[in-house]
Image (tube, grey):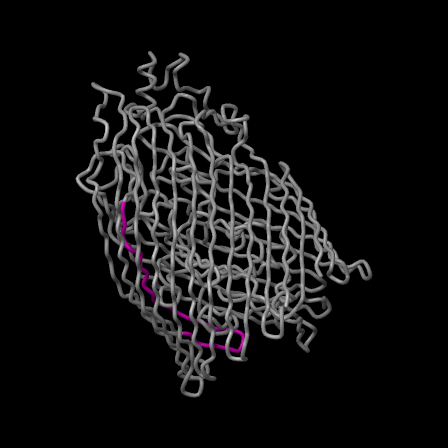
Amino acid sequence: MALVLNAAAAQSPRTKSAAGGAAKKTASAGSARATASQQPQAPRLEDVMVTARRRNERIERTPISMTTVTGAQFTERGITSIAKIQDLSPNITFGNVASNSGVANAAAVFIRGIGQTDFSFGVDPGVAMYVDGVYVGSPVGSVLNMVDIGSVSVLRGPQGTLFGRNTIGGAVSVTSLTPDSVLAARADVKYGTANRINARAFFNVPLSQHLFANFSIGSFMQDGYVHAPYQKDQRELGSQDSRVFKGALRWNPIEKLNITLRGDWNRDRSNGAPFVTTGINPDSTHGMISLANTLAGGSLTNCGGPNCYNSRYFSRNTNYGSNPDFSNLVGWSSSATIDYEFSHYLELKSITSYRKSLGKFAQDRDGSPIGINYVYDHYQEKQFSEEVQANGRAFANRLHYSAGVYYFDQSGYDINPTQFYIMSLLSGGSFTDRSYAAYAQATYSVTKKFNITAGVRYTEDNKSFLPNQYYKDTIGAPIFYEPYGTRLVPHERYHNNNARWTPMVNLSYQVTPELMAYSTFSQGFKGGGFTQRLANIAPAAPSFRPESVNSFEGGLKFYGLNHRLRVSAAGFFTFYDDVQLLVADATNIGPYYTNAGKAQISGFELESQYALGDGWTVLGSVGMTDAHYTKLTSSVQGLNLNTMFVLVSKWTGNLGLSKRFDLGEYGSLTPRADAAYRSRYNANLNAIMYDTLIQKKFITLNLSARWLSKSERYNFMVGLDNATNEKFMAWGSYSGSFGNYQKSFDRGRQWYIQGGVSF
């Protein structure tokens, strides 16, 4: 359940300003602190300090388009999954998708139209995720449950000069609570729809004058919602069974030195991703479903025998697959951050991290007992990273700079035993990925109002892939025959090495004390890679080139009306070259990666918060992303210049309204309503547009009411998520080699009750 995380109490003693008792909040890519204003007679928004540029700045004076949500704000909304950040920030998609696999926890994140739908080792994510300053190299297991989250920041546009590799679309930075000197404990439990039981606890303990620790634990359980009558015990798909343990230790032996050690362990089990088959494409006459029906004595669209694939397997809430669907993941990580203030003008920092994940997941993708398309993954990934930073200032504080070096080493394997109607084979292989980088960025105050920022990064990515892929069995001549052991590609190591300089220039001007204007030019780069899943014989492992963007952005930020109104606006135009795209067309049995061509992306974001007074607060945002291809290569069949980007809505928006009622000795009650809007999008994870895989526009509405005792020790909450019961399509999938449409729908309306205590 929503853990009652008051970031201020967990990180520092509560402080209030002299002007009206307004709370101060620090929430950024680096840290988050918050306290709630208790003075409705003098309404003010919380001050927000961010460290997106490696130093403390007010968010309205940071020339970056960004959204920051604290752990306390997630708690106030009853949110327990990081994926819900897409309902609170414009121009972002944060999906949990099973792309051509059975994995039930894999993030597909897009910012301003740029991202990635697949977890395959052959391709890097287009939006980088950072957890406590550590880059997370694989999307598997990245749909985090909210346990001890201090803040989540969304930075839009290329962030390469400071945030490292693969921030071509932007970055999502998650910050955990840091141990401090305040003895505190929090716990809560949530119960709701489909036996949903979420329980969380957090403890912060000062062990000595210079040594502090915190520990958190979470359990997240819920029954599935897609019926699966042919699965073991007729279990339902879309269930959740997750455990999380996290701990941190901070040592402050001298005033200028902080050493923070962090560790976590998580286990995620599921009956399988919640998907159904809703129909077949009548034009897929050369697919395996068509062949199966022909051999059963019928045709693709007219087959009534017991071995026929027909409408008895089509449904919106039932999956008729008979091969086991499941998703089991285990992962752990550790990190050490050493922060030393060498002098008043120079701070040195080292971030060292190691992560490892293991998984087995499978999916009966035809959703029937006939045996047309079954995939299995044996997955292992481990990564080591080291970053050394120097952050400082000079020339009477007119110059602020940050420089550093970065090393990343990732390796593992994904072995894919696969069964198709006409063959069974072993696909996948092992990989290594090493990246080296050096960067520098500096901001110079030409005047008190005018600043110039310039930065550059050099990145070198060295990837290798060792495929172990061969046929085990085939249906036989004359349909298809290959001897056992025939390799799809030669068993040798393939290399894909890339290097690039990516610069950034930013100009900002403080027009008035309340209003700032800025403009930015930046470049982004993402290395090339390989198609991992093969089913066709090829002379070598198929590879693809790097992709890059040139991005132009301009914006305004306002914070005024006696700190009651905060508004930020940004417009952008992006030239997108060598777009890396996952596609499934008739030329290959399985999905493959290619450089699809060029694109242009333009749009804007507008965000606002307003403290109306008398306990009323309203906030909202609107974003527009106009993404379209301008030139396509001949490597893909089915794409055209009007093809919509995958999972990217042109329009996104959200609106929230809350009212705090002071109940005197009985505490306070805060009802709230939060609505989120998304215009239509192409849900096919394999890129090509089909009318049935276009999700129409929809609005979701969440309602809740939260009671807080006068001492703020006890809380109770009731809520209704997706109150209008929108059964929108979270993702879809189609491959012409098979012919059936897969869809995964949202669970729909959910209710919950929650209670918590803090000390």
Looking at this rendering, what residue extends furthest in the right direction?
Answer: 665
Asked if residue 108 shows in the view, the reply is: no
Residue 30 lies, in percent from the top left, at 50, 66
Give the number of callouts: 0
Task: Find residue 297 and report its image quarter.
Answer: top left
Q: Is residue 194 magenta?
A: no
Q: Which residues are magenta?
A: 508-530
Quarter of the rendering occupied by the C terminus: bottom right
Task: Find residue 112 and report its image quarter.
Answer: bottom left
Chief SS of the magenta region: strand
Residue 191 lies, in percent from the top left, at 67, 43
Residue 239 lies, in percent from the top left, at 55, 37
Looking at this rendering, what residue extends furthest in the front direction?
Answer: 208
Looking at this rendering, what residue extends furthest in the left direction?
Answer: 539
Which residue occupies the foreground of this view, 650 or 235?
A: 235
Q: Residue at x 44, y 42 (%)?
A: 97
Residue 739 lies, in percent from the top left, at 35, 27
Q: Residue at x 54, y 54 (%)?
A: 88
Judge from the rendering whether residue 714 lies leftward or rightward of residue 104; answer left or right.
right
Q: Is residue 526 magenta?
A: yes
Asked if residue 393 shows in the view, the reply is: yes
Which residue occupies the foreground of this view, 475 or 569?
A: 475
Judge from the rendering whether residue 206 lies leftward or rightward of residue 679; answer left or right.
right
Task: Find residue 371 and report its image quarter.
Answer: top left
Which residue occupies the foreground of this view, 105 or 700?
A: 105
Whether residue 387 is situated above or below residue 2 in the rendered picture: below
Whether residue 169 is situated above or below residue 9 in the rendered picture: above
